[in-house]
Amino acid sequence: MKPLELLEQSLQKRVLVELKGGHSFRGVLEAYDQHLNLILSHAEEVVGEQVTPHAGLTLLRGDSVVFISP
Amino acid sequence: MKPLELLEQSLQKRVLVELKGGHSFRGVLEAYDQHLNLILSHAEEVVGEQVTPHAGLTLLRGDSVVFISP
Amino acid sequence: MKPLELLEQSLQKRVLVELKGGHSFRGVLEAYDQHLNLILSHAEEVVGEQVTPHAGLTLLRGDSVVFISP
Amino acid sequence: MKPLELLEQSLQKRVLVELKGGHSFRGVLEAYDQHLNLILSHAEEVVGEQVTPHAGLTLLRGDSVVFISP
Amino acid sequence: MKPLELLEQSLQKRVLVELKGGHSFRGVLEAYDQHLNLILSHAEEVVGEQVTPHAGLTLLRGDSVVFISP
Amino acid sequence: MKPLELLEQSLQKRVLVELKGGHSFRGVLEAYDQHLNLILSHAEEVVGEQVTPHAGLTLLRGDSVVFISP
Amino acid sequence: MKPLELLEQSLQKRVLVELKGGHSFRGVLEAYDQHLNLILSHAEEVVGEQVTPHAGLTLLRGDSVVFISP
């Protein structure tokens, strides 16, 4: 298995995405590309204790991704 | 769907764009390219509690984008 | 419209350019290239409350640009 | 031996991965690619004294990796 | 005019170069390349209030340049 | 001599490697590639006064290397 | 003259090299390449007031270089 194949298996599943600079997101993975650009639905932004829901679809820039976890 | 197609669907709609370094912008997405360079109209810059309206069109450099949300 | 076309339309007009690291400049856009390298005339550097005028033409490195606004 | 061959030898073994920004992970290396993108199973995130287990498979972005150790 | 042509016109003239991380230099521009690598003669390094003269020729790495001004 | 040839001469010898972000390692250089990815055996991680031995082989990502010294 | 030709002229001469993150080195330039990877002999690392001599040859990664001065 190559690392990016994990993203294929994670489509339509809930993921946790940690971004550079202290942001992280939870949501359902709707799409990805080879740069690790991601689209989440039902996204919640988590900064420390603060959770902010984002309506619609959120695009996360691959360059900012640190790790992706179920 | 590929992640950047979300931008095509977001044209002429309001988006929230988080940039590296603590800046974020709200505005109407007028244009984008594959580097995630973006143009917003009716842009408001948000730094903490402070909201600064920007007249005309604002160009955000793709390299600085962390995430884009409705 | 592609994002960089906005720069073509902004030639000879006043712009605000925010740079990484807290610098920003106001001035008249005299030239640009596809890396977002910019030349401003009548430039003023703004760091917090402090405004420093720069005589002649100022070259801003595209890699440092965060956003460009009228 | 080339450096990345060490990853081939580390498959299915426990590794410690230090990431930029103070995150580190312990887990079993399940996959890697030439960008140093990694997949860990049984991953535990370690930030200072705090250990957070991650169920399933965790994808670490190669660009964030500082070092990998047994 | 393209932005880098400004450097051609600035040869043998005094420039101010701001670098990432708080360093800046004043000196006479002796050479440049398309990466914005620069050579200054009669260079003075300015960090806050402190001015340090550098004898001979100083090479500034283009990747570190933020802006160049007369 | 080209800079990377120094690494060829340093194989099987003890080196000190300084990484971005304040980490440094001492160990025996076992392998390298042109990106400056390195493998050390008998590695010790040094952060300030604290020395942590790492068993087995440690892979240091070239992108994080600041300098390498005997 | 192109900027990197200065390095050719500086071979076997003493240079001061400022690196990102607050490190700087003094030493004799023994080799360089087009990425600004450098080898110094008789190197001394300078961090604030603290000077640490490095025996043998020290490899500085070009990507970390801010400026090079006699």
Image: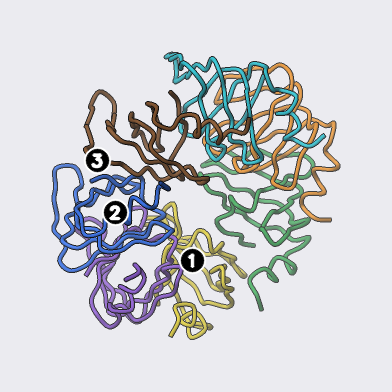
Chain colours: A purple, B yellow, C green, D blue, E orange, F brown, G cyan
Residue at the image position 65 percent from the left and 49 percent from the top: C61
Where residue D56 appears, x then y in whole percent?
Answer: 18, 69
Disc 3 residue crowd, few under 14, some 14–19, many 20+, Cα 10 Å: few
**Labelled disc at residue F42:** none
Which three-letter amino acid code belongs to the residue tagged 3?
Gly
Disc 2 residue crowd, few under 14, some 14–19, many 20+, Cα 10 Å: few
Q: Quadrant of the C terminus of chain F?
A: top left
Q: Secondary structure at mark 2?
A: helix
Q: Tell me the residue that label 1 is attached to.
A: B44
Q: CA distance from mark 2 to mark 1?
A: 52 Å
Left or right of F67? Residue E59 is: right
Q: Tell me the residue that label 2 is attached to.
A: D9
Q: Quadrant of the N terminus of chain F?
A: top right
Residue at the image position 22 percent from the left and 32 percent from the top: F53
Where residue B62 appears, x then y in whole percent?
Answer: 54, 64
Q: Chain of mark 2?
A: D
Q: Chain of mark 3?
A: F
Q: Chain of mark 1?
A: B
Q: CA distance from mark 3 to mark 1?
A: 53 Å
**Labelled disc at residue F56:** 3
Asked whether the residues under the numbered discs 2 and 1 touch, taking CB atoms below 8 Å apart as contact, a structural biologist would say no
Left or right of G56? Residue F38 is: left
Foreground pick, E48 / G61: G61
Foreground pick, C51 / E70: E70
Where residue E19 appears, x then y in whole percent?
Answer: 60, 37
Label 2 vs label 1, nearer the camera: 2
